[in-house]
Structures are given as structure tokens and as C-alpha cells.
Amino acid sequence: MTLLEVDQLVVDYGAVRALDGATLSVARGETVGIVGESGSGKSTLGSAIGGLLPKAAEVTGGEVKVDGSVVGSMSARELRALRSTRLGYVFQEPIGSLDPTMRIGRQVALALRGRASRADVLDRLATVKLADPARVARGYPHQLSGGMAQRVAIAMAMAAEPELLIADEPTAALDSQVRDEVLDLVFALAAEAGTTILWLSHDLPAVARRCSRVAVMYGGRVVESGPASAVLAEPRHPYTAALAGSVPGAVSEGQRLVAIPGQPPVLSGASPGCSFAPRCPAVLESCAGERPRSHVSGGHDVLCHRASETVGAAR
Ligand SMILES: Nc1ncnc2c1ncn2[C@@H]1O[C@H](COP(=O)(O)OP(=O)(O)OP(=O)(O)O)[C@@H](O)[C@H]1O
């Protein structure tokens, strides 16, 4: 059953177009990795789902539905309810999710929606494998290491057992050892609570290893989505092919995506054609002037004029 539907979403920050008709559908229980270079629109998409876009942003087209309800039509109260009961967010910088002036235990109690006993709070902190939950509960955010703070942020995001957890590069600020532990934790807690995961990441190998589905973003659109193993083994979009082709040996888990020659676009308005055309090794004449439409090919959704051809030919 569909939990999240993003349909042709367009978001502008003034003259900069961050999302240019992004479309994505996520079923309950899926673990979906959204992969893309810096500026491809991942964070904007993640924020739009919970009505958390900054003031500078304007939704100028399309819509987001969570469990059938249109997020853009919700009142402030409905949005607060959506965020406190159905969605959980974890960001790159855990400190940003924590109140520097409040003891950790009190913050976790609030995330448990005010009905929490001290034992509930300590239980919750124990689920994120903090060695001494009582000590952490008594402390303040500045007393925690980055890894510990992210564990607390995860405990708070998962406190209400949300239907959808949006994890926006949750481990980018952590060192590699802690990174794996934190990801293990996120996926284990989500599996236990039946929470669907949307994980926004630069880290293609890590996403492929942990997620059931991958969506690749480029120029504010989802250019390919499908089962993780199939998308990586047989990419249909030349951009995904370039990313996937660069995986063996060239990039290991935890590293950022290797560069593809050329620069990703900064759009100011709708892209007239495929925004990957200037960097595409398989570009056709029509690519620059005609927007590719969704094409289902081998179980993947692909936005490419050449989607029906094999990627072997496109590369
Ligand atoms: N507050 C803002 N004001 C103006 N432009 C913004 C703002 N936030 C994002 N943008 C622009 O919108 C586009 C998409 O940015 P977004 O942060 O969503 O991408 P991203 O894929 O999450 O990148 P990163 O991986 O670096 O976080 C970029 O061109 C970015 O410069």
C-alpha cells in the first residue's frame, strides 16, 4: 500500500529551481535510498514531505501526499500532528535536532509525547545502545560526542514509532566506524517498528547494500527508481550507469560519489529537456529540447529518451 506519493513536485528558492517535477512513490515497509550529487534536490524533497521547507522556498507545482492526505493543504495544526506522530526526521547534524538548554532525558520524554516515565526514557535511550542511559539522560547535548548525539536524535525520531522516517545524510558528519553502527541501528529500529525509511545519501554502495529500492535524483527530478539490486546491476539511465560503473574499486562505502565530467545543473525554471544532456555520453539531438517522460523499463522507472535501449548501448 502506498504511504508516500510525490507527484511532479516543483519547488523554487527565488530564481533557483530545486525540484523540477520530482515524482516518487513509496510503499509501506519499503527502505528507499535517494541518491544524488550535491544540489540534486534531495534535502528539498525530504523537507517538502513534512511541510518543513524554509521560508525562501515556494512549491510552484505538483503535490506530496502522505497516506493519501495532501501535505500542501494541511493547516499548521495538521502539519504539527503529521510531524509528531507519523513522520520522524534525522538530519546530518544531530545537534540541530536537540535543544542545547534542556537535559536529554526531558527532551526524550517530550518526544515520547509527554506521557513518559523515567523508565520509559531510559528504555528509549537503551534502544539506541547508549552505554549509560541514566548518565546521558541527566546530561546536556554539548556533553555528547557526535555519534552519541546522533543516537539520541534517532531515539527521539523513533520515539513515536513513525510510519515514515526521513534520514537526511544521518551519518555524513560521523567517522566511518560509528557510521556503520548508526546505520545498523536506524535500520534495525525501523524494521522493529514497521517504519518505512527514506534515506537521502551521496553514498551509493551503502544505499545499495541496505535499501530495497533506490531512487536516483538529478537536476531536481527522480531520473531512475527501482529495486536496489536491479538499478545497480542494470542501470537504465546513463547517469545511474555512470554512477554504478564507478562503484567497483573506485568508491568504497562511506565515500562521496566520484565526479562525472561536467557540472550538475543549477536550474532557473523548468529544464527545457533532459538536464543530464550536457554531461550524457549517449546524448541524442532531441535530449536538450524535449523533457523525457517516465518510461518503465525492466521494472525500473526511467526518465530518459533512450530508456528502451539497453544501457550497454547507451554507455
Ligand atoms: N535555502 C535555500 N535558498 C536558496 N537555494 C537553496 C536553498 N536550499 C537549497 N537551495 C538550492 O536548491 C537546490 C537543491 O538543493 P538541495 O539542498 O535540496 O540538494 P541536495 O541534493 O540535498 O544537496 P546536498 O547533498 O548538498 O544537501 C540547489 O541548487 C541549492 O543550491
Image (spheres, rainbow, N blue to C red):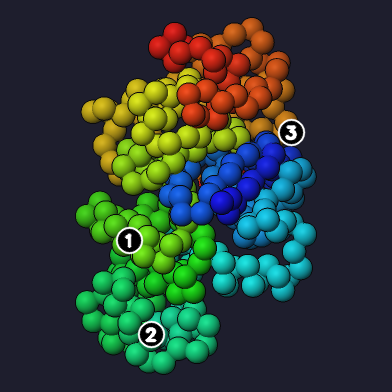
In the picture, residue 123 is in which quadrant? bottom left
Residue matched to label 2: 121
Residue matched to label 3: 269
Q: For this view, does 260 lie left or right of residue 288?
A: left
Ligand 1 within 8 angstroms of badge 1 C-beta: no
Mark in front: 2 vs 1? 1
User: What residue type is disc 1 on?
Assistant: Ala
Percent of width and height locating residue 226: 47, 34
Label 3 Cα neighbours within 10 Å, binned few <14 / some 14-19 / many ≥20: some
Q: Quadrant of ligand 1?
A: top right
Q: CA distance from mark 3 to mark 1?
A: 40 Å
The answer to whether 241 is drawn above or below residue 39 in the figure is above
Residue matched to label 1: 188
- Residue 216 seen in the figure: no
In the picture, residue 16 is in which quadrant? top right
Label 1 Cα neighbours within 10 Å, binned few <14 / some 14-19 / many ≥20: some
Q: For this view, does 40 lie left or right of residue 80?
A: left
In the picture, residue 86 is in which quadrant? bottom right
The answer to whether 304 is drawn above or below residue 155 in the figure is above
Residue 243 circle label: none
Marks 3 and 2, the one that precedes in the sequence: 2
Marks 3 and 1, the one that precedes in the sequence: 1
Question: Image point 70% across, 58% down: which residue?
Answer: 69
The answer to whether 52 is drawn above or below residue 265 in the figure is below
User: What residue type is disc 2 on?
Assistant: Val
The answer to whether 40 is drawn above or below residue 278 in the figure is below
**Element under label 1?**
helix
Percent of width and height locating residue 147: 30, 65
Question: Image point 42% across, 30% down: which residue?
Answer: 231
- Residue 257 seen in the figure: yes
Ligand 1 within 8 angstroms of badge 3 C-beta: no
**Element under label 3?**
loop
